[in-house]
Image (cartoon, rainbow, N blue to C red):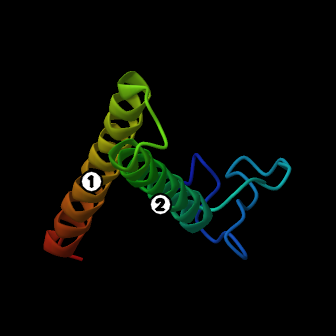
Amino acid sequence: MTDPLGLIGAQNGVGGAPASGGSRPPISGPSFAQTLRSSIEEVNRAQQDATRAVEDLATGDRSDIEGVVLATQKADNAFRMLQALRNRVVEAYDELKQMRV
């Protein structure tokens, strides 16, 4: 079996040598877990900002309704995107579970 991407037999989560025998620089950048964690933290910050904006509007510390609506919409959209990502990951996991080896 050939490995056109050079990922079979990769060491430490970094791409190995391609099947053609040439060398390839190691893959760098954040891992999937790090990217997912930072996305969750970003959504959490957006939710906290929206909550703070609504509380400030209710207490009278803030008077711009447009800013509050924008913050809540931003938090809602971020949460929906994260939820869609979660659904896709669960679907992919379910599909992998059903594969026969």
Q: Along the line of sight, which residue is nearer the eye, 51 or 26?
A: 51
- How many C-alpha atoms fall within 10 Å of the one at disc 1: few (<14), some, or many (≥20)? few
Left or right of 98: which side holds 43?
right
Residue 33: mark: none
Q: Amino acid at mark 1?
A: Gln
Instruction: Indicate left or right for 32 with 26 as reference.
Output: left
Residue assigned mark 2: 40
**Residue at left 72%, top 46%?**
20
The relative height of residue 51 versus residue 95 in the rendered view (above or below) is above
Which residue occupies 54% across, 65% down? 37
Q: Does dot 2 land on a helix, a strand or a loop?
A: helix
Q: Residue furthest top?
A: 66
Q: Nearer the viewer, residue 77 or 89?
A: 77
Instruction: Identify the residue at horizontal 50%, vertical 60% (top origin).
Output: 36
Amino acid type at image mark 2: Ile
Q: CA distance from mark 1 to mark 2?
A: 10 Å
Identified at 19% across, 59% down, the residue is: 91
Where residue 22 sits: x, y (%)?
Answer: 83, 47
Secondary structure under badge 1?
Answer: helix
Where, quadrant-wise, is the C terminus in this rendering?
Answer: bottom left
Q: Say if 46 sits above or below 48 in the image.
A: above
Residue nearer the viewer, 4 or 73? 73
Q: Is residue 1 visible?
A: no
- The residue tagged 1 is 83
Question: Within 10 Å of the Cα at label 2, are there few (<14), some (14-19), or many (20+) other Cα atoms?
Answer: some
Q: Is residue 10 above or below residue 84?
A: below
